[in-house]
């Protein structure tokens, strides 16, 4: 699971948001913005240093925030190695810069993430003309891209300086800033889950994916505090997160679909959308 943010010009992001996001999504962070003088998209990435990343963001915003949209991404790895090469955003051969939240099923190539593969093979080689004639302006390409990405949210920073967000309605737009999921919220707190059924292990916040970053991420192994907050201590079952809708389900509610783990609802939706118009 990742967090993708697209902010309109003049909309600054807080250091607190960067700090929270880097804990929930600890496998790299990157940003892209547009230099209106040189007509270039500029990119900066860090693997783990959120302090340095925010300083770079502040400098970039001071120089370009009044005229440019900003695309910011925090990665939580689901496919591909944890490395700077797999940190979003990615730039395609066509000059389009892409960041992604979700999983594109059926993509695998060694250590590469599914997003890197999608940019290399599809999004990064689509035709880019002058403004108004880019692939983002073409209804047929939009239909194909939505079918290809399924439930994912993808932002394409075009060489013109515009940003297209696919599956925009699956995110949250607040005061001119769009977020791909609810992990941006100050009070976001993953549900209590357990690594094993009750009697095998003490439950912790977020199981294998997340911990309670707002309250005790400095001491997230303090399992007893999580245990004490769980109202049903005698019936804790294994749960995990669907990488498409980000809902939490019991393990017997998951299915394998094109090599990815999905809840049954998402698997059914993806099967219906695959090869058809995916209007969301």
Image (tube, rainbow, N blue to C red):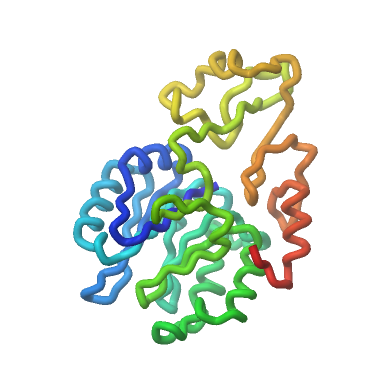
Above or below: residue 223 compared with residue 237: above
Q: Residue at x 51, y 21 (%)?
A: 221
Residue 122: quarter of image: bottom right
The answer to whether 199 is drawn above or below residue 108 in the figure is above
Residue extending furthest toward the front: 175
Instruction: In the rendered view, tell whether residue 91 sits above or below residue 24.
Output: below
Percent from the top left, x then y, of residue 49?
A: 32, 43
Numbered label tally = 0
Could you tell me which residue is drawn at 58 percent across and 23 percent down? 204
Which quadrant holds the C terminus?
Answer: bottom right
Examine the rendered structure and indicate whether residue 43 appears above or below residue 75.
below
Q: Residue at x 45, y 72 (%)?
A: 92
Pick the front one: 224 or 228: 228
For residue 71, side relative to residue 182 (left or right): left
Percent position of residue 63, x then y: 20, 61
Instruction: Locate residue 1 relative to residue 87 in the image: left or right.
Output: right
- Which quadrant holds residue 18? top left
| Percent coordinates x, y for residue 59 in the rendering | 21, 54
Q: Residue at x 43, y 86 (%)?
A: 129
Location of residue 2 in the rendering, given as x and y in whole percent from the top left corner: 51, 49
């Amino acid at each position: 699971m990742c967090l993708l943010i697209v902010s309109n010009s003049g909309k600054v992001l807080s250091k607190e948001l960067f700090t929270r996001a880097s804990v929930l999504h600890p496998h790299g962070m990157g940003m892209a913005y547009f230099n209106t003088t040189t007509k270039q998209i500029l990119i900066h990435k860090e693997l783990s240093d959120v302090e340095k990343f925010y300083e770079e963001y502040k400098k970039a915003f001071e120089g370009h925030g009044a005229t440019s949209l900003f695309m910011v991404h925090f990665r939580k790895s689901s496919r591909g190695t944890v490395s700077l090469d797999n940190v979003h955003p990615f730039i395609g051969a066509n000059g389009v810069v892409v960041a992604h939240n979700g999983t594109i099923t059926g993509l695998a190539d060694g250590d590469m993430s599914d997003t890197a593969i999608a940019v290399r093979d599809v999004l990064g080689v689509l035709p880019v003309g002058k403004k108004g004639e880019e692939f983002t302006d073409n209804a047929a390409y939009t239909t194909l891209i939505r079918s290809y990405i399924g439930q994912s949210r993808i932002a394409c920073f075009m060489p013109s300086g515009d940003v297209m967000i696919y599956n925009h309605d699956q995110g949250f737009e607040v005061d001119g800033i769009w977020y791909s999921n609810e992990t941006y919220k100050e009070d976001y707190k993953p549900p209590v889950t357990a690594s094993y059924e009750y009697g095998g292990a003490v439950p912790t916040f977020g199981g294998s994916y997340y911990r309670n970053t707002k309250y005790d991420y400095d001491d997230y192994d303090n399992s007893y505090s999580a245990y004490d907050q769980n109202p049903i201590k005698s019936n804790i079952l294994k749960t995990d997160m669907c990488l498409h809708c980000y809902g939490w389900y019991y393990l017997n509610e998951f299915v394998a679909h094109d090599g990815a783990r999905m809840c049954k609802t998402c698997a059914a939706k993806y099967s219906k959308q695959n090869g058809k118009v995916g209007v969301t």
